[in-house]
Amino acid sequence: RKAERYLQRVGAATRHAGGQEALVGSNVQRSLAKRLQELSAEFRQSQRKYLAEVRAQKSGVNPADAKFGIDLTSAAVAEGDFFNTQQMAVVDDLTEAVQSRDQEIVNIAQSIEELSSIFKELAVLVIDQGTILDRIDYNMEAVVEHTKTGIQQLEKAEKHQKSARPLKCIICLLSVIGVLLILLVYKHRPHHKH
């Protein structure tokens, strides 16, 4: 439960933060997820061990049952004689043990449900992070495309600018030559005196 709450807090903070804080939040979230996995593995191992013990006890009489002092193969039990007080106490102890184990099984089932909800929420966090990465990837591709288009536009503009500059110089020089020719013609023209 604690790890689940921490993961939720870190996930929310990471979504709202930016830059370095988001990176730190992401690292904390990964650390908490790793700790949660370790605890889950430890829990599963304990659960397997307990279930193995329960199966061993259900499969037949094992040496641990002899300590209660009941001989199930005795003639008195087979003939239906009543239990003595020691045997009744053992039966009471066994009943308490069964009830205790039933409660432990219920607790284990609740823990499994909680673990399941934790994994579901963790899956949601992973999906959210994947969506964010997909959006970042899409934005990066869009930036690359826009950059390529911008470079092409700049190259076209550069070509137009380079080709227009010599043309302007030629027009300017032709204008100057034309003005000078007109001045020359005007200067060398015969003057009429009246």
Image (cartoon, rainbow, N blue to C red):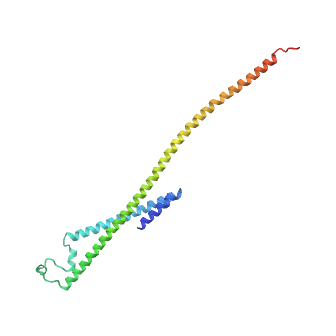
Seen as rendered, the residue at the extreme right is: 194
Seen as rendered, the residue at the extreme front is: 194
Rendered position, 179 above or below 89: above
> Closest to the observer: 36 or 189?
189
**Residue 168 in picture, x, y percent from top left:** 67, 28
**Residue 35 in picture, x, y percent from top left:** 41, 63
Q: Residue at x 30, y 73 (%)?
A: 103
Count of marks overlaid on the render: 0
In this rendering, position of residue 6 left or right of residue 57: right
In this rendering, position of residue 35 left or right of residue 63: right
Q: Quadrant of the C terminus?
A: top right
Rendered position, 9 above or below 133: below
Rendered position, 89 above or below 154: below
Seen as rendered, the residue at the extreme bottom is: 85
Rendered position, 15 above or below 141: below
**Residue 90 in picture, x, y percent from top left:** 22, 81
In this rendering, position of residue 170 left or right of residue 124: right
* Quarter assignment of residue 78: bottom left
Q: Residue at x 28, y 69 (%)?
A: 50
Q: Residue at x 34, y 68 (%)?
A: 110
> Closest to the observer: 8 or 68?
8
**Residue 190 in picture, x, y percent from top left:** 83, 14
Q: Quadrant of the N terminus?
A: bottom left
In this rendering, position of residue 55 left or right of residue 109: left
Q: Residue at x 53, y 42 (%)?
A: 146
